[in-house]
Image: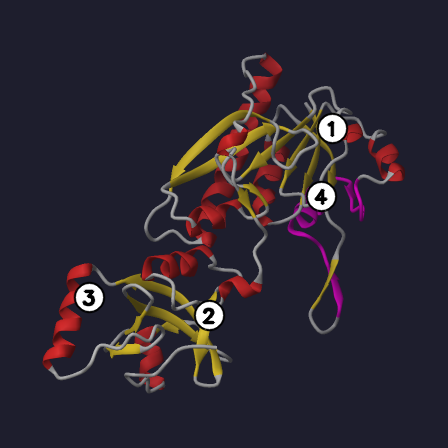
Amino acid sequence: MRVIFMGTPDFAVPVLKGLVDSEEHEVTAVITQPDKARGRSGKLVFTPVKEAAVEAEIPVFTPIRVKEPEFVEQLKKIPCDVIVVVAFGQLLSKEILDYPEFGCINVHASLLPRWRGAAPMQWAILSGDEKTGLTTMQMDVGLDTGDMLLTKEVAISPEETGESLHDRLAALGSGLLLDTLKGIQEGTISPIPQNEEESTYASMLTKEMGKINWEEPAETIERYIRGLNSWPSAFTGFRTKTLKVWRAEVLQEEEAAGMKKDRELSGEKETSTPGMVVKVEKNSFVVKTGNGYLRLLEVQLEGKKRMDAGSFLRGVSVEKGEILCI
């Protein structure tokens, strides 16, 4: 099949490369977001998809608005049987959706209709989902509302981070898309409408979301630490600086109860202040939350490198009773 590929971030690159390497398909053009200025120099930087397309010597187009009539006319001059869309970042008009013979196929990083929207992988972790996956979808004018074609399910492990899940699903996207295109050509796939009552929305991530609210339960905070890794990352205040928390674990009930008992036997009063450091260990330190305790295992102080908590404690004296807050 002749394919026009639309995508922007790293997540889309393996799917594009899979199409380029396949013998059954020809990528006739790549559409991606415009170059962006980065750093103090303001130098324009290609999107990851544009980098891959240039390397493969595929024509690249970077419209500011893909719906503009001038660009739509330009798009229609490019031969294609199908448009493949992976994390492109713009909604398509009906005119574009109707242009190819086989329409527009999207590779979406969730098990639709759960987690439509911009950040499905992260929200699956933030919400404590036990599984997620990929869905190929026949696109319509809505936001991730089209009929489902094929799915690939994966389990979310207790240690899963937004970054690790991103990498796992990105690696699976190419195979699922190629199977989808084969099924479409052979007429062996029956599109399945989404159940609107089961839909959830994965809103775009913001830097402010990373601010740890120690009033929340330990389980919730731990999920946010994992889900927002690597961006925007979870953070709190440590004295006058920002402290990023990259890895933590929830104290199990028995350990939390034992620690509380030890404090009572030593004459300490139980504090009800979330965010307080209640124990400093050799390779970690424990913080009280709104419900339970969280052991911090990997941190990064503002202006310093990311490191395990043991290395951090060897360079910084953390005092029991300190409050972590911004």
Q: Is residue 182 above or below residue 211?
A: above
> Spatial distance from mark 4 to mark 2, Cα to Cα?
30 Å
> Spatial distance from mark 3 to mark 2, Cα to Cα?
23 Å
Of circles 3 and 2, which is in front? Answer: 3
Q: Which residue is mark 3?
A: 256
> Sequence-wise, which precedes: disc 1 or disc 4?
4
Residue 53 is one of the magenta-drawn residues = yes
Question: Residue 118: x percent and y percent?
Answer: 59, 47
Q: Which residue is mark 1?
A: 97
Please tell me which residue is depicted at 90% across the width and 38% down the height of the picture.
70
Please tell me which residue is depicted at 73% across the width and 49% down the height of the picture.
33
Q: Which residue is mark 4?
A: 90
Quadrant in the picture for the N terminus: top right
How many residues crowd around disc 1 within 10 Å: few (fewer than 14), some, or many (20 or more)?
some
How many residues crowd around disc 4 within 10 Å: few (fewer than 14), some, or many (20 or more)?
some
> Sequence-wise, which precedes: disc 3 or disc 2?
2
Of circles 4 and 3, which is in front? Answer: 3
Q: Amino acid at mark 1?
A: Leu
Could one spot residue 300 in this view of the protein? yes
Q: Amino acid at mark 2?
A: Phe
> Spatial distance from mark 4 to mark 3, Cα to Cα?
48 Å
> Sequence-wise, which precedes: disc 1 or disc 2?
1
Question: Residue 26: x percent and y percent?
Answer: 69, 28
Residue 43 is drawn in which quadrant?
A: bottom right
In magenta, the rendered stretch is 42-66
